[in-house]
Amino acid sequence: MPTDDVEAAESRFQTGIDALNDGKLDVAAEALSDAEIRFRMLHDFKRAGDSRNLLADVQRQNNQLEMAANSYQRAIKFYRDAGSTVNQAGSAQALGHVERQLAHIDRAEEAYQDAWNLYTAQDDALGQGNATLALGHIALQRGKMEQAIEHYTRAISYYAKAKDSINEADARRSLADVLRLIRHFDEAIAEYQQILKVYEAMGDQYGIVDALVGLAGVYLDQRQLDKAADTFAAAYNQAQTLEYELGTADCNLGLAEIYLLRNNVDQALISAQQAQQNYTNMHSDLGIASASRLLGEINTRRGQLSYANGQMERALRLYKAEGYRIGQPETTVGLGEIQRLRGFLNRAIQTFEEARRLARSLQNDQAESQALLGLGDSYYRQGKIIQAEQSYSEAQNRMESSNSPGHATGMAEAALRLARLSVLTGRLDGAESQLATARSVTTDNELASQLIPMMLSSL
C-alpha cells in the first residue's frame, strides 16, 4: 500500500485523537470520519474499526446516542472483518451501554451477550466480568432479582480470576444493592462493610462514598434512622470534598427520606430539591425520577396536590422511559393516593390496582400493602364498606407475613382502618381487637406508634 496514503490516514487519526483530548469534539468527529474512510480504502479494517469506534465515543459525548450506536455497529463489522476479536468485544460492550441509555433493553442485553461470547472465546476473564456485570444491571432493571444475583455472583468470580480487586468490589456493591432490595439486610451489610475495606485499602474515595450510601440505605430500610443519618452525613462530607455530585445527590435524597419519616417536612423538601438539582446537573434520569417521586410524597404531605401529582407523573414517565420497573410500584401508589385525595375515586381505584399488580410482580410486599390500603380508603369514601374491609384485611395479612421494613407500620395502618369500620358497623368487640393489634405491633416501633393517636382521633 502507498506510504503517503498510510501516513495521511495515520495523520488524520492522530488529529482526531488530539482534538478529542482537547475537547474539540466537532474537529475530532470530522478527522476520525476521514481517517476511517482512508483506512477502509487501504483495506486496513482494524484501523478503520479504531477510527469508527473513537468516532462513536465522540458522538456519545455529544449525546448523539443513535449515531453512536450506528458507529459502534460499524466498528464491530470492521473488527470482525479484521479478525480482531478483543476489539470487537469492546465495541459490542460499548454498544450495549448506548442501547441501555436509549432504553433499548433487549438490544442492550443482546450486545452484552455478544460481548460475553467474544470474551469467552478469548478466555478474557476481565472482559467476561464486565459483560456479566452489565447483564446483571439489565436483570435488575427488569426487576428480575434472582437473575441479577446470579449475574453479579458470576461477575465477582470472573474479576477474582482476573485479580481485579476494584471491579470485584464494584460487582459486590451491585450484589449488596440487590440483597438490600430483597430485604436480606444482614447479608447486604456484610457485603457493604467488606467492600468498604477494599475501597479504603485501594484508596478509591468515590467507591467509599458509594459503599457508605448503600450501607446507609440498609439502615434506612431497617428504620434505624440515627445510624442512617450518621452514615449519609459521613458519605455527604466525603462527596462534597471530592466534588462528587452524584454521591452528594444520593446523600441528599436519603437524608430527605429520613426527614420525611421524622415528619420534618420543610427540611425534607429542601434536601429533596437539592438532590433533584444535583441529578439534573449530572443528567441522571433515574436520579431525577427518584427525587421527583419523593418530592411528590412531600408535597402530598404539604397539601399541594396539583404540584405533587405533576411530580409523581414525571417520576413514572422517567421510570418507564428508562425501562426501570423497580421504582414504579411506589410511584404508582403515590399517584393513586393523590388522585384519592383530590376526589377522583374511580381513577384512584384503577391506579391502586395497577400499583398492586406491579408490586406483586416484583414481590414488593410493602408497596402491595400500601396499594391495598389505598383501595380500601377509596372504597370507604364511596361507601362500599364490604370492599373496603376486604382490602384492609388483605393488606393486614400481606404485612403480617412480610419482613419488609415498614411491616409494623403497615399492619398498624390496616388494623386502625379495620377498627374504624368496626365502629361504623357497630362491632365494638372487633374494634377493640383491632386496636389491640395496632398497639401490639407498634410497642417497640417509634414511627409506627405515631399512627395510633392520629388515627384514633378519626374513629
Image (cartoon, helix red, strand yellow):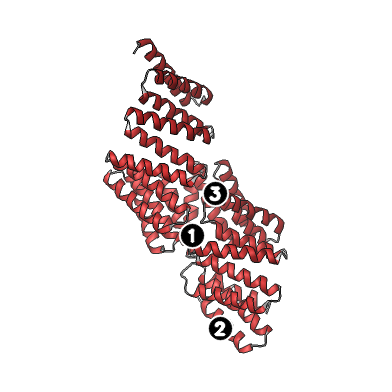
Q: Is residue 179 left or right of residue 274?
A: left
For residue 228, the mark is: 1
From this view, report whether residue 98 is shown above or below residue 150: above
Give above or below for 260 relative to 171: below
Residue holding disc 2: 436
Image-based side of 387 in relation to 52, left or right = right
Image disc number at residue 97: none
Secondary structure under tag 1 reads helix
- Left or right of residue 447: residue 187: left
The local crowd at label 2, few if under 14, some if 14 to 19, many if 20 or more residues have their Cα within 10 Å, is some
| Residue that appears at 62% across and 50% down | 273
Q: Is residue 167 left or right of residue 180?
A: left
Check if mark 1's residue and mark 2's residue have beta carbons within 8 Å.
no
Reading the image, the residue beneath label 3 is 287
Relative vertical location of residue 14 with respect to residue 120 in this rendering, above or below: above
Look at the image and tell me whether residue 8 can be seen: yes
Question: Which amino acid is tagged 1?
Answer: Ala
